Image: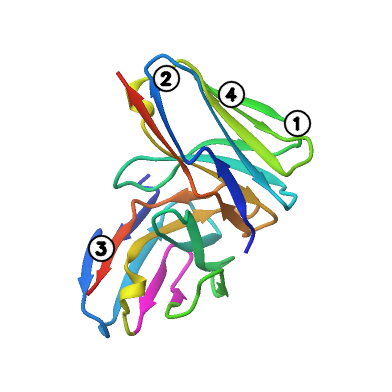
Amino acid sequence: NAGVTQTPKFQVLKTGQSMTLQCAQDMNHNSMYWYRQDPGMGLRLIYYSASEGTTDKGEVPNGYNVSRLNKREFSLRLESAAPSQTSVYFCASSQPDNEQFFGPGTRLTVL
Amino acid sequence: GQQLNQSPQSMFIQEGEDVSMNCTSSSIFNTWLWYKQDPGEGPVLLIALYKAGELTSNGRLTAQFGITRKDSFLNISASIPSDVGIYFCAGQLTGNQFYFGTGTSLTVIP
């Protein structure tokens, strides 16, 4: 069991570039999440998917889009990256009403 | 969004000492979770609490779900160098609604 995997591990973008962060889980979880982590601010929810085929906005969704490709995979897309999106991005998965399991993170820098 | 107040923000302790940290909220949560994050890694679940008043242990770690359902604490006994990291509390309202504290950074001095 790999748990939750994320790619890439590191990324540097220029302002205005686009990219997609990939996430996959092998625990057969229904729910998947994308968070960003900034210094002193803890984890903030960007988007989540309660089940395959559904997505919902979290606390900080502006500038992001997501796709729940299938039960295993949940991707996060930045269409036009901005310096304010420099952060560490974590994907997580869970069964409803159960604890979340996190991936190792993607460290994104936008210049 | 919901605010979870986690304290202290940072702790510097001697190896062998006990550690205590807590999390409070203005909202009632159904579940409290405690995670540890090592540098460069994702948070790893330490303890999950599901009922008000519940006291749960995991090795040297003990956590409690407050009676009011608005708070939780985590104790670490006899700290060791590998306890170093950032500890996060998280509260779950229902289903997919999780809210995280800002973290407690723990440094253990050998």
Query: Which residue lies at the image location 34% right of the left edge and 40% below the top edge?
Result: B38
Compare marks 2 and 1 and give the one earlier in the sequence.
Answer: 1
- The lab-note entry on whether marks 4 and 2 share a chain reads yes
Query: Which residue lies at the image location 63% right of the left edge and 26% below the top edge?
Result: B56
Q: Are marks 4 and 2 in contact (CB under 8 Å)?
A: no
x and y percent of residue A51 in the render? 57, 66
- Where is the C terminus of chain B found, in terms of image quarters? top left
The part of the chain drawn in magenta is A66-79
Residue B79, numbered label: 2
Q: In the shown orientation, is residue B11 left or right of residue B109?
A: right
User: Which residue in the structure is indicated by mark 4?
Assistant: B57
User: Which residue in the structure is indicated by mark 1?
Assistant: B53
Q: CA distance from mark 3 to mark 1?
A: 41 Å
> Please, is residue B9 above or below residue A14 in the view?
above
The number of numbered badges drawn on the structure is 4
User: Chain under label 2?
Assistant: B
Pointer 3 local density, CA inside 10 Å: few below 14, some 14–19, many at least 20:
some
